Image (tube, rainbow, N blue to C red):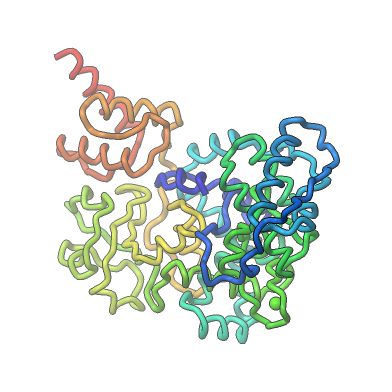
Amino acid sequence: MAVRTRLTAGLALAASMLLAAGCETPAPNGPDAPEDPAAPNTPAPPPGPSNPRSFDFSTSGSDTFDDWRRTFAARAQSSGRNPDAIVSVLDDLTPVTQQVSTAAFEQAEFVKPIWDYAESAMSPTRIATGRTKLASLPDMFAEIERSYAPPREILASIWGMESSYGGFIGTFDAPAALATQAAEGRRKDFNEDQLMAIMQLIEDGSATRDQFRKASWAGAVGQTQFMPTTFLAHARDFDRDGRKDLWENTGDALASAANYLSASGWRKGEPWAIEASIPADFDYSLGDGQKKSVAAWKALGLTPATAPAFANSDILQAELFLPAGSYGPAFLLFDNFNVIKRYNNADSYALAVGLLADQLAGRPQLSRPWPTDITMLTPDQARELQSGLNDLGYSAGAVDGIIGRNTRKALQGFQKDRGLVADGFPTVEMLTAVQTASVLGAEN
Ligand SMILES: [Ca+2]
């Protein structure tokens, strides 16, 4: 999803996390992989009907919406969708007022540090409930682990993050939400693809129209919040009752998530991350996204902070991730971290899923606390930092107020050239240093 792509910023708070821990469904999330050609689909449609059905939808009250719907319905029919399914999905729709405005999400995402997201995701209630679920469904998790690559604690963590373990799966009508966005021209192709997928799922009997009345405002459905195209490509019928019931059937939902992560490249038996202890005088500029073997990181002085279970990871490639710069815990990230991001493309989301999973598995707490007393930059200050770095010749990229990997890397360059700890962490002190250097540069 586009939003997810934008959210790669390290400090980005995934939109899904605006939600207080333990309630609400996440904002745009849920996987949306490209369609899998092996996925259950209807047979190739016959050539378009010689007399295409003309659709007579009741008006929605919006001319824009009605015009879009007429055009889209005709296109759906010419792509082979069943007219009954088209009517079922598109008739009687009312444009959804965006009570949850995108702007509000965007604002809130970047004023909160990444650890706020992780901490809110890991409420004591969510951890306790997750452990109870793992203990009460051992056979289900064991069978899923036999068939798919990810371990049970990762699946349980995603389940907890996405729907509070099935407790909250959304109250929006997916077709109405998706059609509203498509009609308004927001991510039109993406949203139209989702609507087409819903039609196919209804046609092939995988789901009913009514089930899609329980969705997130972004159109994600079920206990693991699948977008319809991902549902079409990756959902599984775990209990073999002939239906892929991601809403009511936990086995179907979690097997589907496991299947999706497997298809996204989950490496069985490998960790998502290891917390690393960093020695004094370490060159923090190495935490700029470059990958090295764990053995190479150890040779540079890093040691696992708490994870003896991963002692055999020396040959794995890892990236040093400094979500709190030199002020908090550091992580060696493995390929599985990026697989979690296929679910929701935000470092903050993947970090929260991983940390919650570790707690569900009974692993040690982080060895270092998050720097909760540090003052974060406001979006305006972040723009000033980016602009200053750009002025000084460090490529921070777009001046958008989002502290992403480009900004962090540019700041690392600035810090390194001045003999500062090159952790790329945007403190108010660093903003002042950049502004001072920028002013001096302009005067010279
Ligand atoms: Ca089933």
**Foreground residue, 405 or 228?**
228
Nearer-the-camera pick, 258 or 58 = 58
Q: Is residue 248 left or right of residue 439?
A: right
Residue 276 horizontal/vertical position (percent): 30, 63
| Left or right of 75 on screen, residue 379 | left
Q: Nearer the viewer, residue 223 or 90?
A: 90
Q: Quadrant of the C terminus?
A: top left
Q: How many marks?
A: 0
The location of residue 267, given as percent across then percent down, is 39, 74
Up the image or down, 347 lies above or below 390; here it is below
Say above or below: 241 vs 402: below
Expressed as whole percent of the image width and height from the top left, the position of residue 246 reads 68, 68
Residue 21 drawn at (x, y percent): 62, 54
Q: Residue at x 32, y 47 (%)?
A: 325
Quarter of the view holding residue 240: bottom right
Instruction: State whether residue 30 appears in this view.
Output: yes
Q: In which image quadrant can residue 204 be found?
A: bottom right
The single residue placed furthest to the right in the displayed view is 58
Residue found at the very far top of the displayed protein: 443
**206, above or below 343, in the image:** below
The residue depicted at 71 percent of the width and 55 percent of the height is 215
Q: Nearer the viewer, residue 308 or 381?
A: 381
Residue 171 shows in the view: no
Ligand 1 is found in which quarter of the picture? Answer: bottom right
Quadrant of residue 392 within the rendered picture: top left
Q: Is residue 421 left or right of residue 181?
A: left
Residue at horizontal 22 percent and vertical 50 percent from the top: 284
